[in-house]
Image: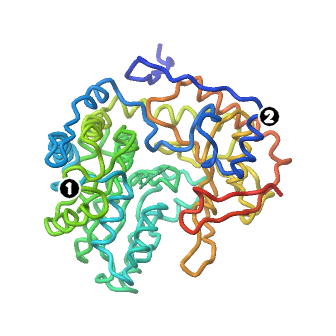
Amino acid sequence: MKNIKHSWAEPYKIKMVELLKMTTPAQRKKAMQDAGYNTFLLKSEDVYIDLLTDSGTSAMSDRQWAGMMMGDEAYAGSRNFYHLESVVKDIYGYKYLIPTHQGRGAENILSKILIKKGDIIPGNMYFTTTRLHQELAGGKFEDIIIDEAHDPENDFPFKGNIDLNKLDKLIKKYGAKRIPYVSMATSVNMAGGQPISMKNLKELRAFTKKHGIRVIHDMTRVAENAYFIQQKEKGYKDKTIREIVKEINSYTDGATMSAKKDALVNIGGFLAVNDWDVFEEARNMVVVYEGLHTYGGLAGRDMEAMAIGIGESVNDDHIKARVGQVIYLGEKMLEYNVPIVTPIGGHGIFVDAKKFLPHISQDQFPAQTLAAEVYLDAGIRTMERGVVSAGRKANGENYYPKLELVRFTIPRRVYTQAHMDVIAESVARVYERRNKIKGMKMIYEPKYLRFFQAKFEKL
Ligand code: PLI
């Protein structure tokens, strides 16, 4: 009896299905060429299993759909806003709420309020939209994540941690006055969904307090981070996800949230702060960029679905199955010797394209190439997270990130274990023929966030 495994399973059953189109290799070849070898430019109906992102792609529950029918679509003072506000206070612990249409809406407002020209914003690895808003507001992002995060094979369990020595050096170099806040993300997306530990967060809080620097939390995937703390950090195994999430937030001064991830909705986000002055300024500004402060670009029904989704997102059974499915896929890929970022993160598997295609130089876009090849094999859509996503510096030079990854992002509550098997087998097939794969050149490059619309040609 002792050796029988205790498997996780989904804490829900399926009530409605969406049919998928199956494609032939010839159809996929044409679709990929038409898309300029950029998976963002594929038509969704040409995709079999869509792992482009976990953003806005979750399946909502029957309770969330019922909530949608309870939308109060008043221009001002919708009851759904007050419901959301009470949930953000109660579950997340932040005092003041500004709803926004999605995460970057909150990033825009926050960056404009807190950042002055010439400021430095240290953070645990950049995220594309977050860094761009910081730069557009006149700031400069500085990466202070621990070195382990840049090594895909390092098995340290909390690769999202912040290196306080790096922060200290920045303070000594620029002075605390030029650092408006530390941009701290839970489940660091670009590092492979890697968590930050509670211990590190507590140390960060104490250190920043000493220097009078705020901590702003990108809480897009906070529940997934909480799961790793519960499973791996001493002293947390008997705490609930809900308790851990609240504790994480308690060490920060405010947060930007893309509710399209953890919070299980297809659209929505918010800015939440504890500081009245920042709130007041944000409440002024949201009217300019998003909408009135009681809807922020969202319909009443969207806010209701978000309020209910936040509650579901901190349920222990939900998060165990959610991350369990990601780990299942990662372990399957490892069985086929596919090089992936380890430890396996919370929202997807990140395949190490430098190691998968060592004969392709970073100038020939190994991760972009691999994402195209994976689509061609079985219609699985993934995303480049490497030199294309990293973009260019203010002086026009490319950023060359150490990590050159293809992200297989798992939408929440959408695909089954059989889909995971199909994905792992497809990647294993591409891995078998890896030596024959050639790189690409970029033939069209947009000015901002180029990965969304750039086009490529095979060499
Ligand atoms: O896509 P938005 O504007 O709702 O959120 C922006 C955003 C902010 N922070 C983090 C960590 C994100 O992952 C994020 C969006 N991520 C996307 C779209 C993704 O595919 O990962």
- Rendered view: 64 above or below 199: above
Give the quarter of the image for residue 309.
top left
Q: What residue does disc 2 label?
A: 26
Which residue is located at x 27 percent, y 57 percent?
271
SS label for mark 1: loop
Q: Amino acid at mark 1?
A: His
Which residue is located at x 19 percent, y 37 percent?
72
Asked whether mark 1 lies closer than 8 Å to ligand 1, one says no
Residue 386 x/y as whole percent: 62, 59
Residue toward you, 323 or 53: 53
Residue toward you, 444 or 60: 444
Q: Residue furthest right?
A: 436
Distance from the alpha carbon under mark 2 to that under mark 1? 50 Å
Residue 175 x/y as whole percent: 33, 85
Left or right, 74 with respect to 168, comes to left
Give the quarter of the image for residue 151.
bottom right
Mark with earlier residue (2, 1): 2
Left or right, 149 with respect to 277, comes to right
Instruction: Find residue 273 and name its label.
Output: none
How many numbered circles are shown? 2
Left or right, 438 with respect to 12, comes to right
Residue 292 x/y as whole percent: 21, 55
SS label for mark 2: helix
Instruction: Find residue 293 and name its label.
Output: 1
